Amino acid sequence: MPEASAKPAGTQTTKAQQQKGKDKNSAGAQENKAQRKARRAAKVSELGKSSNTPQEAITQARAQSQAKQCRAASGTSNASNVGGGSSNSLVNATVSNAISSLTAQSTAIHGSDILDKRVGLFKHLEITRRSGTADAAKDIHPVILALTLQFASYTVIGSSARCRATLRAFQKVIKDYRTPVGTTLSRNLTNHLSRQIDFLITARPLSITMGNAIRWLKQEISVVSIDVSDDQARESLIEKIETYIRDKIEVADRVIVQSAVKHIGNGDVILAFSRSAVVEQVFLEANLRGIEFSVVVVDTRPFYEGKEMVRRLARAGLKCEYVLISGLSYVLNDTTSVFLGAHAVLSNGQLYSRVGTALVAMSAKRKNVPVIVCCESIKFSNRVQLDSVTFNELGSPDELMNISIDPTPKPGPLKNWRDLPNLKLLNILYDLTPPEYIKKIVTEVGSLPPSSVPVIIREYNSA
């Protein structure tokens, strides 16, 4: 019996020694890990202080990692497969951490200073970001990558143009889509499109028109029967998207043009703000009908969209004038009517459009000049908004540094605005025009006052 009791005592001593050794090893591992983190942080700090840009530093880190992997592979050629895999995994993990740190540093250099210099009243709004394709997931379709870059660079601009381009891109996404095994198209395709949309909004927020179109498309996908083959379902969805573009945008624009052109007479001087595709079509149609009138295009920074409309109207033979918004009060003296486009019309009759629209409408109202808005019903929104602060979109402050009116950018006195601690730039993209400044809204369902917008929204939703 004494011998039997002595054996467990020895076993307990051995376990205590083992536990002590494990604690010691764990403490040593934590100390080594802390040292590695400190060395990595020091290395990132040195890279940040160097003359290289963050992108160059990331490229350099990747090149160094590849060299380390080659040396590790040659040095462990005689080692076992397990040991070699562990070494490569350690190198890859270290490289991944270094690149993540450098990427975070790049974001801090290019992003946090802008976030810190936002105007206090608009800090809740998201600044338009310049999107890249490096961080795109593997299931993001190439056409979505290209469209995201076009949105970020404002190559595709305008509510209807962005909606049309998005739906065209979705047609290609659906065409190339293949349903995974074990699921159905009606369930999985919606999630697949959601991932495309999530990447798309990294460039710019969705417009009201895009949001309405996406909700419609997801509804159409959800009602696809499981008895229909995937090929037939894809063809049907692509055809429905084409019909939606034709009915809600193209045909709607033609109907609006036929109705709005009746408000233009001989000798009229019509003022337009910035550029609207449907307003431009109205002017071209009136010119084709032989109506003698002239157009004054009022434009503003930072996009100078009105220049393109003036160029097209002048080529068509129309008499045109081009003026910046600072000269608005002078050109309104001879104006007989104002034609405006819309980004969206809210359910309380407010016009949500390019910033400066409210100033144009208010100034026209004071001079008793009628304001006519041309807007497709797809741009109507259930949202109620009373100011331009609650919901809006902020453009990059760097857009305001360009003082050139030519395509070639020319930085002005504000090129070093980040270095001025007391200076903040505000590049707000939209504003709200109260309904009392608007005489009539011309849509494809007829001309109506702003107070009748909720009726059209109710009919649109019921359909």
Image: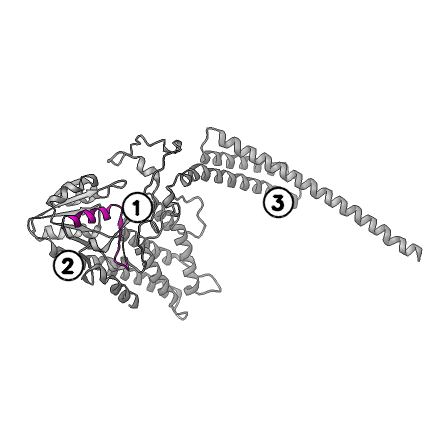
Query: Can you give x and y, in whole percent of width and height, for residue 207 in the image?
Result: 32, 53
Distance from disc 2 to disc 3, alpha carbons, whole Å, reads 72 Å
Residue positioned most to the front: 366
Magenta extent: 345-366
Residue positioned most to the bottom: 227
Query: Can you give x and y, in whole percent of width and height, for residue 398 in the image?
Result: 34, 37
Give the vertical position of 349 relative to 430 (above or below).
Answer: below
In this rendering, does residue 99 appear at all? yes
Left or right: where 215 falls relative to 446: right
Q: Secondary structure at mark 1?
A: loop
55 or 347, nearer to the observer: 347
| Mark 1 touches mark 2? (CB < 8 Å) | no
Query: Can you give x and y, in whole percent of width and height, for residue 217 in the image?
Result: 34, 61
Residue depicted at x 33% and y 41%: 426
Find disc 3 in the rendering and name its residue. 85
The amino acid type, in three-letter code, at marker 3 is: Gly
